[in-house]
Each structure stands twice: as structure tokens, then as C-alpha cells.
Amino acid sequence: MDDSDLIEHTVSSEPVFDGTLLHVRRDMVRMANGHEAVREWIAHPGAVVVLGWLDNGKLLFERQFRYPLQRIFVELPAGKIDPDEHPLDTAKRELREETGHQAKFWRHVATMHPCIGYSDERIEIFWASGLIYVGHQRDHGEFLEVIEMSVADSILAVRDGEITDGKTITALMWADKIASGVWPVPE
């Protein structure tokens, strides 16, 4: 199939809402068949998620209240990319701020797009090992509990519905494949 049969071209674009984090846009697009359609989507700065491997073989997780769903979630350390910040620098900053750990070794594992139907958000997945505790530096208003969990236990927590966060589940798929030797640690 020729990709030109799938591509949509922007005819016009207008801002609907500009917030501190998110920006909503409404675009008119022309499809391959010549018809036009509206696409409403969210512009997002991007984010990172960190697989923080402790020397005991466990991963660092956080328990954190998430306002939109009004509940506490178990998730891997993560955060948004600041303007002009490299994703690796974001990963290092978030691991330190949230868990109090720094890592000697870093690897980029993968890129995921969690909301392809309505957002341009991308999340960069990083592997961090050789962790040392240096003390957290949480943002004002950021409250969380840091916990440790093995890859096997975290996979069971996904199965049992205790971990439902999409970025965490995707990163854990990578962790499971790497820890079991199915996939190599990325270079």
C-alpha cells in the first residue's frame, strides 16, 4: 500500500485552549480521498519513564495520588520534559527528585506514544542502574511513597489490576524481556 493513501494534510489549525502543561488544538485536515475532517488534539511537551534497577534486582516504584482519576497509582518514576531539556536530563532529574537516587549507568530503551488518537505525546523509556541514594528533591506539592518491587512481582501486579498505568506497563514489558534475557540491554 502506498502511504499517500493514509496521510492527512493540515488545511487550518486553531488553538482551543492553552494551559500550563497541555495545549488543545482544532485542525481541519484534508484526507487522501479529498474530503475534509476536524481533528482535535492535545499538544504535549513529552515525558520520560525510568526503569530504576537497584543492586538487589528490584525496581523503584512510586505510589502517588493522581487527581483526574481520584486514586493512588503504583507507577515507575516519570515526569514531563521541560522546554529545551534533553530527555536523558529529564530522566536523571526525575529519578533524583522523586526517589532520591542517582544512577551510574543510563540507557535509552524505547519511545512510546500513549495517546495516538488525540495527542502528540511521546514518552522516552530509560534504563538506569548502579543506583545510589543521595536524597530526594521533590517539587513543592509533590507527595509520593517510594517502594521497591521485583520485575516478577510487578508483572503479577499488572495481571491483577494493581498496576494500570500505561507507561509503567509498557516499560515493564521491556524490563521483563531484558531481565529474562530475551532482549539485550540496549547499547
Image (cartoon, grey):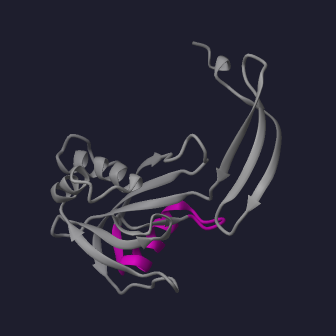
Compared with 13, 146 (above or below) is below
For the question of whether residue 47 can be seen, the reply is: yes
Image location (x, y in percent) of residue 70: 44, 69
Is 161 left, or right, of 78 in this rendering? left
For the question of whether residue 187 can be seen, the reply is: no
Q: Quadrant of residue 33?
A: top right
Q: How many marks?
A: 0
68 drawn magenta: no
Compared with 16, 31 (above or below) is above
Is 176 left, or right, of 171 in this rendering? left
Compared with 14, 153 (above or below) is below
Q: What residue appears at the point 77 percent right and 54 percent down from the top-left corner? A: 16
Q: Quadrant of residue 161?
A: bottom left
Q: What residue appears at the point 33 percent right and 71 percent down from the top-left corner? A: 62
Residue range in magenta is 81-104
Q: What residue appears at the point 65 percent right and 51 percent down from the top-left corner? A: 42
Q: Residue furthest front?
A: 70
Quadrant the N terminus occupies: top right
Is 46 left, or right, of 60 in this rendering? right
Image location (x, y in percent) of residue 148: 22, 71
Q: What residue appears at the point 60 percent right and 44 percent down from the top-left corner? A: 118
Viewer-closest of 47 and 161: 161
Is 155 left, or right, of 111 in this rendering? left
Image location (x, y in percent) of residue 82: 61, 68
